[in-house]
Amino acid sequence: MTAPATTVPATAAPVPVERVRHIDPREFAARFELAGMPCVLEGHVREWPATQRWGRAYLQAKLGQVEVQYKVSTNHTHPNFHQATLDKMFARGKGPFADFLDAITRGPSGERSRMLLTGDEQFILQRRNEQTTYGEQLRPLLDDVEFPAFVPRERLYTVWGWFSGGGVRTWLHYDNNGCHNLNAQITGNKRCLLFAPSELTRLAPFPLGGSNPAHNCSQIDIEHPDFERFPEFRGVPCFEATLEPGDLLFIPAWWFHTFLHLGELNSNVNFWWKPEAPVMNEVAARQMLIDIAAAAKSKLAGATSTQELLELLDRAAIAKRYG
């Protein structure tokens, strides 16, 4: 199996993401959240029980018999968009958490990066319309986690857990929920590349109306870019962050990002929350179009003119905002 690339020479020389040690929530909100700039909060969760305890044996004792679902790839990229069909790109497996942990930490070295558990399959917590719902199977993980003071509890949206072996590469994408993301590194290490929303065109997301519904993902394999198809990607500006256990990475809403997971066992807990006011940029506008079209899709097929199509989209937009 080809080893995952640790650097991406096609991009411009990455700008290191700012790292801060001592900062209070008010200063964080002003300098990073409201400014829409990523940062690493260095060592801020180093004293969590999770950071102290999580390892294969501990997690197997705590949740080993819980049946989990997880992503399965034919290589180390998730999803693997080189596959010919959607079912292979988004393949899933399931089994006891203990077996999954054994496979990603003790299985054949070439196989360990082919499995990835994320909140796509099983969330820990989600909050919608002021109602909090727990994913009961993974809820015990919260025993070892504290809610960061930087996350406004009234705007909390989702809490996910991530578990993988070394070598996993998450495909370049943006989070389509419009939320800020605080990624708590528990065990292992990560290298992250981040791209500002203003680079949307150069990052070539899968086109709307195309056969691939992953519209928030880039078409570009960041480790092996095809410059004949995507010449604008060469030299695109990017930011880079390296996460150690106990670090928090702040990813502002709508930023593209890709992670390379390192270490024998890589575990993270992510906190998403809604911005205090809607963030508008190129990526947000595109996702708004996607969401409005989805809300109007049952009527769009019957549109007989551009004017009627615009009227249907306008009604869907108003209903989505004010309904």
Image: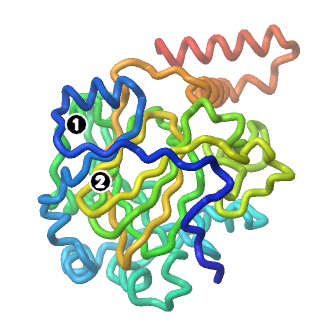
Up-down relation of residue 272 to residue 35 (above or below): below
Q: Splitting the image into 4 quarters, where does residue 273 fall? A: top left
User: Left of 208 or right of it: where is 244?
Assistant: left
Q: Secondary structure at mark 1?
A: loop
Q: Label 1 to label 2, Cα distance in Å?
A: 12 Å
Up-down relation of residue 69 to residue 8 (above or below): below
Give the number of callouts.
Answer: 2
Please name the residue that numbered disc 1 is placed on. Answer: 150
Q: Secondary structure at mark 2?
A: strand
Q: Name the image colouring.
A: rainbow
Residue at 19% x, 74% y is 62
Residue 56 percent coordinates (x, y): 28, 80
Q: Nearer the viewer, residue 136 or 72?
A: 72
Residue at 71% x, 60% y is 86
Mark 1 residue type: Phe
Label 1 packing within 10 angstroms: few (<14), some (14-19), many (20+):
some
User: Left of 96 or right of it: where is 133?
Assistant: left
Residue at 43% x, 84% y is 103
Residue 250 percent coordinates (x, y): 35, 42
Q: Splitting the image into 4 quarters, where does residue 282 fall? A: top right
User: Left of 180 or right of it: where is 223?
Assistant: right
Please name the residue that numbered disc 2 is placed on. Answer: 184
In the rendered view of the protein, which quadrant contains the N terminus? bottom right
Mark 2 residue type: Ala
Residue 144 percent coordinates (x, y): 15, 61
Up-down relation of residue 252 to residue 312 (above or below): below
Q: Nearer the viewer, residue 144 or 185?
A: 185
Residue lying at the far front of the rendered structure = 13
Mark 1 / mark 2, whichever is N-terminal: 1
Residue at 37% x, 85% y is 102
Up-down relation of residue 305 to residue 35 (above or below): above
Label 2 packing within 10 angstroms: few (<14), some (14-19), many (20+):
many
